[in-house]
Amino acid sequence: MAPASEEAYSARRPLSLRLALRHPRILRHVPAITLLVMLGPTAAGVVGTLLPAFGYLPALGGYAVSLEPWRALFATPGLGSSVRLSVSAGFVTTFLSLALVALIVAASQGTRMFALVQRALSPLLSVPHAAAAFGLAFLIAPSGWIARALSPWATGWETPPDVVILNDPAGLAMMAGLIVKEVPFLLLMTMAALGQIDARRSRQVALSLGYGPVVGWLKGVFPRVYPQIRLPVYAVLAYSMSVVDVAIILAPTTPPPLAVLLVRWLNDPDLALRFQASAGAVLQLLLVAGAIGIWRLGEIVVARLGRRWIEGGSRGRRDRAARGLAGLLAGACFLSVALGLVGLVVWSFAGLWSYPDTLPDNWTLRTWMRQADSLLAPVITTVTVGVAATGIALLLGLGCLENEVRFGQRPTTKSLWLLYLPLITPQIGFLFGLQTFLTAIDVDRSWGAVVLAHLVFVLPYVFLALADPYRTWDRRYAITAQCLGAGPDRVFWTVRLPMLLIPVLTAAAIGFAVSVGQYLPTLLIGAGRFATVTTEAVALASGGDRRVIGVYALLQMALPFLGFALAVGLPALLFRRRKGMTHAP
Amino acid sequence: MPRLARVFAALLPLLFTVTSTLRASEPDPRDWNAVLEAARSQTVYWHAWGGEPRINDYIAWAGREVERRYGVTVEHVKLSDTAEAVSRVLGEKAAGRHHGGSVDMIWINGENFAAMKRNGLLFGPWVESLPNWRYVDVTDKPTVLSDFTVPTDGLEAPWGMAQIVFFYDTARMTDPPRSMRALLEWARANPGRFAYPQPPDFHGSTFLKQALNELVEDPAILANPAEEAGFDRATAPLWTFIEELKPLLWRGGRVYPQNSAKLRTLLADGEIDIAFSFNPSEASNAIANFELPETVRSFVFEGGTIGNTNFVAIPYNASAKAGAMVLADFLLSPEAQARKQDPEVWGGFTVLDLDALGAEDRARFDALDLGVATLSPDELGPMLPEPHPSWMTRIEETWQARYGAGQ
């Protein structure tokens, strides 16, 4: 420790002097390292996208800055419809998911249903988006499982009806596919936040004042929960607007949403389309930023109206219908993912399975046996990369938060927004730029580079899942421990970390799940040399055989599921004699 | 965050500059012994579409054989779209990695090849120096030398033949239509039971080209660039046809399947009655795979169907050029080609001239049973050439503006 900086610390923050002296300087640098790890790649990628968007890409002979890519972009037939589709998918998905989550939690908190919902979460979260979409598609298609179960005896359909259900022009199927996956994510975030605001007692107070459970929760708890889940809500908004895999399966195609259009251009053999694809990626980024801005304005309006509603004092005691509806919708979400997945599992063991047979003609293990030899290597790569990325993310996340606690630095809103950059930047646009950058400094296609690329996406989610529980943790525990003579390290290891074990493990499980799901970063940064369960799944899915898709969907789900199971099981095991801890915030 | 800014500012100039990588000596394809020598202990990263387990298995087999015989290790990089590999090479060129690239070989043809050739992203010429080149059928299979009318110039080695084949379920229909006009009549009688993948998907665009070939006044003009031949006049009958077909399509033409795999799934699900593919063995394969019922059979149009060749190419900056050439040569060997044509293994048609083979190699091919739903080479009928690539580009653009952008 250099004396100069020691003095600087003591001058600014005399109270933290002791801590600063005792702790390696490294902790102070963790926030900077974290930002560099997250923003460096994103910024490099964005620059690599911005330059071609304005005509600069020397490898393709683009040396001059021009607005030509933008002219080409806006001359694309149907661009308006694509943009409209992306924007409406974003708002509808986010609004309905949030409303559903609020309703489910409001109706179930303090009841047996709450525990049920909580238990159903991990498996739901483990299902990859694309697998859930495939499953849903097989469930609701005109030749799908539901139609097969009812045909022809009830419907009279000897051949499937020629009606548009999937890929419908309004994008409803895509929104449904997104909602069933975003609801579990927001539920998890909400449940993590509930502990922080002592929701249980708020609810009891509301009930004793004569409020119905649903209205009481919406009036007394939701206004305090929302600020804690605001950023995850924005992440849902950004994700729904720029999703590619779910859209390819469920979204309309004439025209497709903007993100799908961009992927198509980037994959077009006509390399000149890259310029307009880059311009499109910038447009996508602006759209996401604009949508978040509009959502923020909406928040203000809702808060105004909500305040009036709360002050009105209506008790809403007759909310049985609302509670029934919540149960129904939660069940529908769960069932559509679960049944879709069961459908894929059945497919993975199916021989010939034609319409309108409810189950396959014959069963076979062949699909599994054929894949068995080639499964081990991708699983190992997936686990090692995922564990490394999650481990680093946890280390950095905890380091940042501990830094905050010890040195009292609160992150500004600005830095939180920076944190979100990797989540709101459309992957396809910025990854191409990042790949160019990493290739230029010759560190691509290494295991470390793949971990780094995963880290960019894992870290924000881990940080998000950690931050609120960490910040709202009751500091009086730490003060008590310090009064008993514990130093900051000891407080961290013996009080804070054990009490926060559940959120820490949950964050790790989320991070691992995010890592398992990465397709483009793995492929682009790893130069295709790191085959994971997901890269194999996507490559095989392009062959369209539901049997193979079923095998990989199960595998893709099994790994994150193990992570979530550990996150739930480990604390239960560790705290089996300390019941209070299992509910610790 | 000034520190961050400084670090980033320091790294930024690297973005588009050339890193110096040791220049590996380029192998000379004409000195085959030197190529074999250089190839030993190289690892070839072969970027190839990975959507079909049986093709993946064949590639794995080829890798094992090449490793055993020549000491070349093969890693199959499974792509969901070949353009990903093209992107990769382009990205490396943008970043200045002109040597030691990540992609050693690509399974490629058509537009992807044309784009790589045009942008100078390919190594070569090397193909005609391969020992097994002498078996390639350059007279009866002219597409082994011209990929979508673009001369291959020795930059890509032929690997397999493809031809459009339609298939249908004999349990559901009899006497399938055998021309575009007959197809339209059939669709009128059976609305909603036919679909083609959405262009610019490869198969969707090929369907349009097939229709153009049948409907255009003089098919000979399709060999010339679209501009010179008068695109609008030549394609007018095509658009009339597509316009008439559209309301009779599956979902009334409001939704299109994404690719031929989806087309096959729709046939299996009973949503449509006719599907098509570029692989003449597709129906037999799908039956063996339980994907289609045993009653499915193939057919082609009376006037012939569009066919082409698929190839393997080596990027200009590949790290293991010698290894890639050795692999490409093995893929061309009668042994590997016969195994590839075996429907139990893959069912991909050979590029070789069977008359040029020795008796033993010839016997490998004669022994093959092509499968119940595969047409014999005679039944496959005449193979129509691909039009000049400019037609495809213009047709895709026009289709996109008319039908792909919503009304």
Image (cartoon, coloured by chain):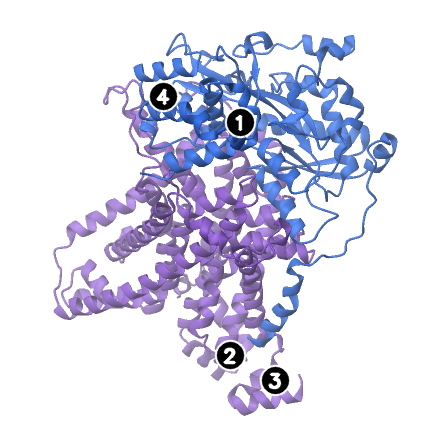
Chain colours: A purple, B blue
Residue placed most toward the observer, B373 or B225: B225
Disc nearer the start of the sequence (1/4): 4
Q: Quadrant of the N terminus of chain B?
A: bottom right
Eye-nearest disc, 1 or 3: 1
- The residue tagged with tag 1: helix, strand or loop? helix
Query: Residue B247's spot in the image, x, y percent?
Result: 31, 25
Q: Mark 4 — residue?
A: A355
Q: Mark 2 — residue?
A: A406
Query: Residue A358's spot in the image, x, y percent?
Result: 34, 23
Residue placed most toward the observer, A272 or A503: A272
Disc nearer the start of the sequence (4/2): 4
Tag 1: amino acid: Thr
**Residues packed near mark 1 inside 10 Å, few (<14), some (14 to 19) or many (20 plus):** many
- Check contact, mark 4 vs mark 3: CB within 8 A: no
Q: Mark 1 — residue?
A: A367
- The residue tagged with tag 2: helix, strand or loop? helix
Instruction: Give the spatial CA distance, label 1 vs label 4.
Output: 20 Å
* Residue drawn 23% across the image and 22% down it: A154
